[in-house]
Image (tube, rainbow, N blue to C red):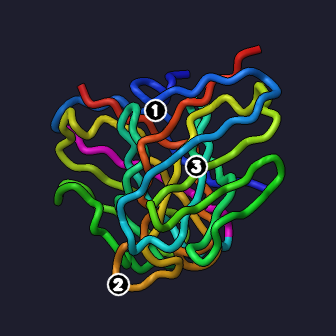
């Protein structure tokens, strides 16, 4: 299938190493953040989310860190596996719950993660 | 269980043609979203439905774009008089309740306008 990774920043890591993908956001009113994984020819797949009243959240092999002071979000993937190869997007939302517009997610440009054997 | 499905998966249209893209959300999901994803970019929000009500259409790029969800389930995104700049992947997502719950995305429809 056609790659969604063209013209995107690329991060290449060795299998088994940890990966850190970074994201800067601009809307200081955003209070809900999500990381998505997108494989070629597929829709985005939810990985993990975090609300603005938290600075860290852990899932299975993944950790999301939020620094609201500098408007920075990161995704850490432990022990990277070949199946982790994909494009990763951060997304933000101004209000976690609907009301008054701004109901959709705002996605970043994405990072293409490549796993070297 | 079945996820979000979209049809067709691929659509080629001549400039000026009208197209209709279909989304079948997960059964029981109240909220439905449409996004447009250009090559090498992140998805961009187009419009949002809560049941049959279109609550937000702020992302629709022009009045050539129209979306409906008449019975609160299946949704159709229609693009009239397609232009080359409309070429993109159109993604549909649904969520169980409101806009604060996890959005599940379909595989998308890749539209190519010649």
At which x and y percent is residue B84? 21, 32
* Mark 2 or 1: the one toward you: 2
- Quarter of the image with the C terminus of chain B in it: top left
Q: Give me the chain letter of mark 2.
A: A
Q: Nearer the viewer, residue A73 or A6?
A: A73
Q: Which mark is residue B21?
A: none
Tell me where residue A71 sits by quadrant.
Answer: bottom left
Q: Residue furthest bottom?
A: A99
Q: Which residues are magenta?
A: B17-27
Q: Is residue A100 left or right of residue A80?
A: left
- What secondary structure is found at the residue carrying circle 3? loop
Q: Is residue A51 left or right of residue A56?
A: left
Query: Are tags 2 and 1 found on a single chain?
Result: no
Does the magenta-highlighted stretch encompass residue B20? yes
Local crowd size for mark 3, using a 10 Å CA cut-off: few (<14), some (14–19), many (≥20) = many
Q: Is residue B85 left or right of residue B56?
A: left
Looking at the image, which residue is at 75% across and 35% down? A18
Residue where numbered disc 2 is placed? A100
Q: Give me the chain letter of mark 1.
A: B
Work out how far the residue at label 1 is from the one at label 3, CA to CA, in angstroms.
13 Å
Looking at the image, which residue is at 49% across and 67% down? A68
Looking at the image, which residue is at 41% across and 57% down? A25
Residue where numbered disc 3 is placed? B106
Residue where numbered disc 1 is placed? B10
Tell me where residue A54 sits by quadrant.
Answer: bottom right
Looking at the image, which residue is at 61% across and 30% down? A113
Q: Give me the chain letter of mark 3.
A: B
At which x and y percent is residue A74? 59, 50
Query: Are tags 2 and 3 found on a single chain?
Result: no
């Amino acid at each position: 299938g056609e790659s969604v990774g063209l013209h995107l920043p690329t991060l290449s890591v060795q299998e088994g190493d940890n990966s850190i993908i970074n994201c800067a956001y601009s809307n200081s009113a955003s209070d809900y953040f999500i990381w998505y994984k997108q494989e070629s020819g597929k829709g985005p797949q939810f990985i993990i989310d975090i609300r603005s009243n938290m600075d860290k959240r852990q899932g299975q092999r993944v950790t999301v860190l939020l620094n609201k002071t500098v408007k920075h979000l990161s995704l850490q993937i432990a022990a990277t596996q070949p199946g982790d190869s994909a494009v990763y997007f951060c997304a933000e939302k101004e209000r976690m719950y609907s009301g008054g517009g701004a109901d959709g997610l705002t996605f970043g440009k994405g990072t293409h993660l490549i796993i070297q054997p | 269980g079945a996820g979000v499905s979209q049809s067709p998966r691929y659509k080629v249209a001549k400039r000026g043609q009208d197209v209709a893209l279909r989304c079948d959300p997960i059964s029981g999901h109240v909220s439905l979203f449409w996004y447009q994803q250009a090559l090498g970019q992140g998805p961009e929000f187009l419009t949002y439905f809560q049941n049959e009500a279109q609550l937000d259409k702020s992302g629709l790029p022009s009045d050539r774009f129209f979306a409906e969800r008449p019975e609160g389930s299946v949704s159709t995104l229609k693009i009239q008089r397609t232009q080359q700049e409309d070429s993109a992947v159109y993604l549909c997502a649904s969520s169980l309740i409101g806009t604060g719950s996890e959005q599940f995305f379909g595989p998308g429809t890749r539209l190519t306008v010649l």
